[in-house]
Image (spheres, grey):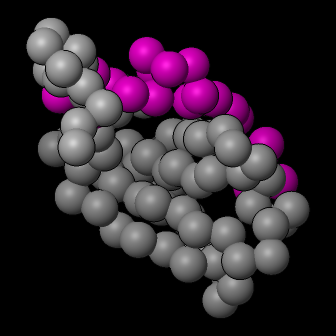
Amino acid sequence: MSYYSGDAAAQPAAIGGSIFTHRGTGVCVKLDAFLNILTKGEEPLVIVTSEGYFTKIYKYVTAYKGFVFFTESLDKLEFGSNIEVIYAQSLGTDI
């Protein structure tokens, strides 16, 4: 059973990787605010990706209280053992 019919069936595919920005749940924060958010969770999860050839830019994403927070850094961050880290090939959103 599909909840989508007709043109509405194509809507999730059309949104694709931009779902965070189209739905308004992505929040860009400064690095220190991002690290502060990580201290609030018991077992936070961070997704990390990097891009760039000559200058690497590291992108970090986490979720907290229903919002997706992200930040960028030129430095690769080291996280404590209580933080689960997933190294992704890419992220499906323009952050």
Which secondary structure type mostly characterizes the magenta part of the structure? Answer: helix
Name the side, left or right, on which 13 lies relative to 95: left
Image vertical order of residue 46 relative to residue 33, above or below: below
Q: Residue at x 24, y 49 (%)?
A: 90
Q: Residue drawn at (45%, 60%), measured in percent from left and top?
A: 47
Q: Residue at x 76, y 48 (%)?
A: 65
Residue 45 visible in the shown view: yes
Q: In front here: 32 or 13? A: 13
Residue 19 magenta-highlighted: yes
Task: Indicate left or right for 70 with 74 as reference.
Answer: right
Q: Residue furthest top?
A: 7
Horizontal side of 85 relative to 63 (left or right) equals left
Res 55 visible: no
Q: Is residue 63 magenta?
A: no
In this rendering, is residue 15 above or below 74?
above
Q: Closer to the camera, 15 or 70? A: 15
Quarter of the image where the C terminus is located: top left
Q: Nearer the viewer, residue 16 or 55?
A: 16
Q: Position of residue 23 (x, y in %)?
A: 50, 20
Question: Which quarter of the image is occupied by the N terminus?
Answer: top left
Residue 32 versus residue 5 in the image, above or below: below
**Residue 36, horizontal then vertical, whole percent:** 83, 54
Q: Point out residue 71 in the picture as x, y percentages from the top left corner.
A: 57, 40
Please tell me in which quadrant of the rendered image residue 35 appears: bottom right
Residue 21: x and y, percent?
45, 20
- Magenta-colored span: 13-36
* Residue at (65, 89) in percent of width and height: 81
Vertical comparison of 19 with 90: above or below:
above
